[in-house]
Image (tube, helix red, strand yellow):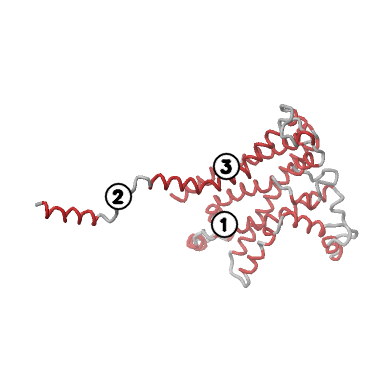
Amino acid sequence: MSQTAAPVRRTAHRGSGSWPPRPGRPRLHRALRWAFLVPAVGYLIFAFAIPIVYNLVLSFEQTSPATISHLTAPFAGLSNYTSALKDPTADSAIIRTFSFTVLSLLFQFLIGFALALLFNLRFPLNRFTRSLILVPWLLPLLVTGTIFKFLFQLEAGAVNQILIDIHLIRAPIGFELSPGWAYLTVLITNVWIGVPFFTVLLYSALQDVPPDLLDAARIDGAGPWRRLTRVTLPIIRPVIEVVFVLGFVFTIKVFDVVIGLTNGGPANSTQLIATWAYNLSFQEFDYGAGAAMNTVLLLIALVAAPLYIWLNRQSLRGDSL
């Protein structure tokens, strides 16, 4: 009886296909999972958490070049915020930042969506032109600002030369010398930079529009405009919303373009929140006021975070339905 039972037990054990797990294996696996997270967590701490916390601390301290090296300074309360926000230049920089962001997003969307619709058609060299549209996005922002600075300069600037050659103007325009023209120059440069971002994402969204729906609308007598507004736009609306939120975050903190193009001038007419915070910190050495302006910019940008998460969840729910 015992001789026949033993082989049965061995056969059943072999048929299970696996040996009993060792007691230490689950703990080792958990430790390895946490170990893989260490580099990412360390990067977030040193690249994001520490600078943000240090900037927040600076905004509540009375700092100077003498105290900044000791990492400690007298507590200033809200005086840095009140002094920074009462400054007329700071007020105009905040208003200008919002107008600059709204106009940039508007023109970036209109031009980017038009290009996305164009690339959605079939024509020769479609892929080649699609690759060229990425060039403004790939260039460093400071380099782009410097390039446009040469394009819009008063003497020997390409823009002035073209406008004179086609007889739109008689004398060169001082784009960098007039506050209105300087603001327009910065706006055009930023629109040129942001158009590829809108074009690529909107073009990707257009690929998800079912051709059957467009064909059905065409059979029903819907023209191009009605097919665009009644079929295409409702389908890609979640992508448009997310693109606008991300574009807002990218545009509200524009810094390199302004520094490379106008450096905030003339007469602070192109100062934005980011550039004015830089000016306060590293040109006037008022680190507390500069940190306060950076905190204001951070709070404005953080408004987009919950909106982005909510839009993503709504999009996922719509896809699941």
Q: Residue at x 81, y 41 (%)?
A: 283
Above or below, comparing residue 111 to residue 39 in the picture:
below
Q: Which residue is mark 3?
A: 307
Q: Is residue 263 left or right of residue 103?
A: right
Amino acid tagged 3: Leu
Helix, strand or loop at mark 3: helix
Say which quarter of the image contains residue 135.
bottom right
Q: Which residue is mark 2?
A: 20
Q: Nearer the viewer, residue 141 or 308?
A: 141
Crowd band around label 1 with a 10 angstrom C-alpha radius: few (<14), some (14–19), many (20+): few
Amino acid tagged 2: Pro
Foreground: disc 3 or disc 1: 3
Q: Is residue 295 left or right of residue 307?
A: right
How far across and how far down the image is residue 167, in percent? 86, 63
Earlier residue among tags 1 and 2? 2
Q: Residue furthest front?
A: 3
How far across and how far down the image is residue 123, in percent? 61, 71
Earlier residue among tags 3 and 2? 2
> How far, Cα to Cα, is label 1 from label 2?
65 Å
Q: Which residue is mark 1?
A: 226
How far across and how far down the image is residue 246, in percent? 62, 48
Helix, strand or loop at mark 1: helix
